[in-house]
Amino acid sequence: MRRTLVCLVIGLVGLVAHLNATDSRIIALGRHDNFFMDDYSIFRNPANISIYPNLLIGSGGYFAQEDDPEELQNTANPALKRVNRDPVSPYAGGIISYSFNQSTESGSQYPMFSIGAVFNRYDRFMDYLLQDTEEFAEAFREDSALILPTPVGKFDVLAGWALKNGSMFGVGAYLAFQKESYGTLPKEIESSLFRLNLGANIPVAQAIDFEASLGVGGMNLIGVDTSGGTQQIKTLADIGESDFILNADLRLFSALASINGEFVPHFGLTYIDITQYDMFEAEFGLGATINIDKGFGWAGLDIIYLQEDNDGIGGRISFGLERNLLWDWFLLRAGVSKKLMFVETADGDGKWIENAEADASDDDFLGIGIGFNVENRLKIDCVIAEDVFYTFTNLISAPQHHLLTRFSISYSF
């Protein structure tokens, strides 16, 4: 009986920690969420919308500043070399749930049905449709003569069902699309991405939950080749004809009284088959979460195998910590992620590569953030610019960029 009570307490504490969540929190806490749960995980596994019933979520996007090519030679005022591109990829949406167990005596809201919709979220597979990304097909990445339409829409729809015993199942779909005429060409140009994701989150034993998701998708690309002063359709076979995407994710959350947290093994894979580009990536990792006084921490190690233009193998070690500071409603977060990969080179040899140290990207080494939690309902999470402690933005140095680089918000009603 005592053991059961301890496990129940751990599970409830863990649930409270899970409710503190947005994509900004993930970035600040170590760049990825392989080993802990948050509301952004509904896009990893749609079954998890049952964990976050009646929730509004959104993001103001993130900052993006670039050198203005017309002002690169302007040495009199360095600030003019940079131009704002804000905001980039804001999104908003929500989840509505209906409980079929309205009795307050039972203490459980299951069985329950949930539906959700999120608009304008940038899915990571969009990178394979846009020419200015590193993931775009190698054969066309630098082809300035190729014209492709930019997809619009970008929306998620989700549905989930939670059984009385706590088992959760869900389905999610993502769609971005564009089709338009170009000049006098007889065929329309097109760019589209569709993904379907199925998920489950099942209690397999006392204080142990198994989470699994499987996603499939496809892309279409039809563009215009304007090289040589002519305009010709770049066929689907040249760019991408009904390309195939497969991704899978498995996690096991096992509560451990000895660490007042959870032990979390993780396995994930991604397979992409594009006419000009194939990629297979597999990750296996072990991690743990821990609930501390007025805070939460996690750590994990991933082994990564990548088969792309050249094969690579390596690993990533990550950890993060958040804690209430001064007031219960104010949180400070920090996290790091170090990734090392040994990849083959074109000459048959190899070299080591790593993630950036401090380029302000979402994949660099360090993340710092703050959070505001009002009565565990309204949560605002922000990522702090990494150089703010050296520049104090515009106070004691040349004009800088931002105090915050990303913020997200959620409200439980």
Image (spheres, helix red, strand yellow):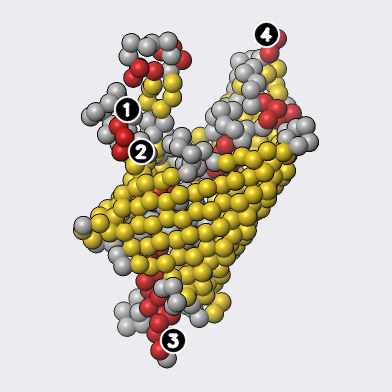
Q: Amino acid at mark 3?
A: Arg
Instruction: Identify the residue position indicated by label 1 in the image.
Output: 400
Q: Is residue 94 left or right of residue 372?
A: right
Please tell me the numbered disc located at residue 229.
4
Picture coordinates of residue 86, whole percent (x, y): 37, 30
Determine the residue located farthest toward the left in the rendered image.
327
- Answer whether labels 3 and 1 touch (C-beta < 8 Å): no
Q: Amino acid at mark 1?
A: Gln
Counting other residues with Cα less than 10 Å from the Cα at mark 3, is it few (<14), some (14-19), or many (20 or more)? few
Counting other residues with Cα less than 10 Å from the Cα at mark 2, is it few (<14), some (14-19), or many (20 or more)? many
Between the C-alphas of marks 2 and 4, the distance is 45 Å
**Does residue 17 show up?**
yes
Instruction: Identify the residue position indicated by label 3 in the image.
Output: 3
Counting other residues with Cα less than 10 Å from the Cα at mark 1, is it few (<14), some (14-19), or many (20 or more)? some
Between the C-alphas of marks 3 and 1, the distance is 55 Å
Q: Amino acid at mark 2?
A: Ala
* Residue located 63% across and 55% down the image: 303
